[in-house]
Image: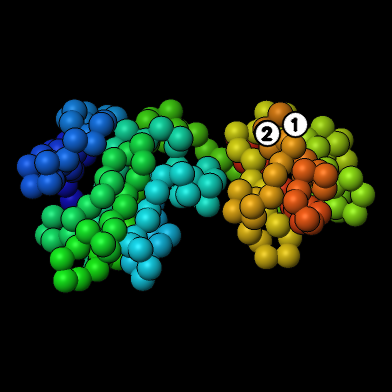
Amino acid sequence: MASSEERVEDINSRRDERNRSTGSGDSGCHKDIPADTGCWTEWFDRDDPTDTGDWETLENLYIENPGKICNEPVWIEAETTSGRTPESAGNVIAKYNPMSGFVCLNKDQKGCKCHDYKVRFMCPLEFCRQKVCWTQWFDRDTPNGLGDWEIFNNLRNENPGEICESPLYIDVHSTNTNTPADYTGQNFYKFSLTEGFVCRNRDQKGRRCLNYKIRFGCPCNVK
């Protein structure tokens, strides 16, 4: 098995090859990566190149995988689902950097479409050492009145010992389709670690709020 130094050297070599072949000017992708920089996430594959292309964007992956990706990765690695690098696959890549993620557009390819890609991110050591334990899902309110009020303090009082005082993450989904709240197209009055989640019916256009459930990511063994 290769050492961490050898793996990092290989990543730097791949980065240099990509920049030479594509003329990439993606910010954040030019410095060599010290071996003790951080840790890798798991691989993610959220999209297929069936429509406009393959969109493995950090914004969407961060929303869809709470607690699994740091908000400021130091590096990104992409390869096809069969294990080929973007360079060897021969695709023209639209975006490939740790701040935006990875995007391959079908319209940029000649006579073919993008391959299906997966990505992973390198995160700082502070994130690596952080162990997250998720609470159960809570659904204390329904949107029949003013809206759906999943207030943090109320949830803690109603569920003693179940929610930590200072959560690291908040995750909100609709109860009917389990859709992440950010993807429902609704407007939210509150959506924070310290206050919880509130969807008001008056803020929606032509409909009322969906019913939502909420959970919190806490430091393990802290309640």
Residue 167, picture quadrant: top right
Quadrant occupied by the C terminus: top right
On the image, numbered disc 1 is attached to which residue?
195
Neighbour class for label 2 at 10 Å: few (<14), some, many (≥20)?
A: some
Taking depth in this image into account, of 65 and 130 the one nearest to the observer is 65
From the top left corner, tell me how far across and down residue 168 is, in percent. Answer: 60, 34
On the image, numbered disc 2 is attached to which residue?
192
83 relative to 220, above or below: below
From the top left corner, tell me how far across and down residue 85 is, in percent. Answer: 18, 56
Q: What element carries label 1?
A: loop
Q: Residue flagged by tag 1: what amino acid is it?
A: Glu
Residue 10 visible here? no
Q: Residue flagged by tag 2: what amino acid is it?
A: Ser
Q: How many numbered tags mark residues here?
A: 2
From the top left corner, tell me how far across and down residue 191 is, in percent. Answer: 69, 37
Left or right: 59 with respect to 40?
right
From the top left corner, tell me how far across and down residue 130 is, in percent. Answer: 50, 34
Taking depth in this image into account, of 122 and 131 the one nearest to the observer is 122
Residue 143 visible here? yes
Residue 53, picture quadrant: bottom left
Residue, far front: 206
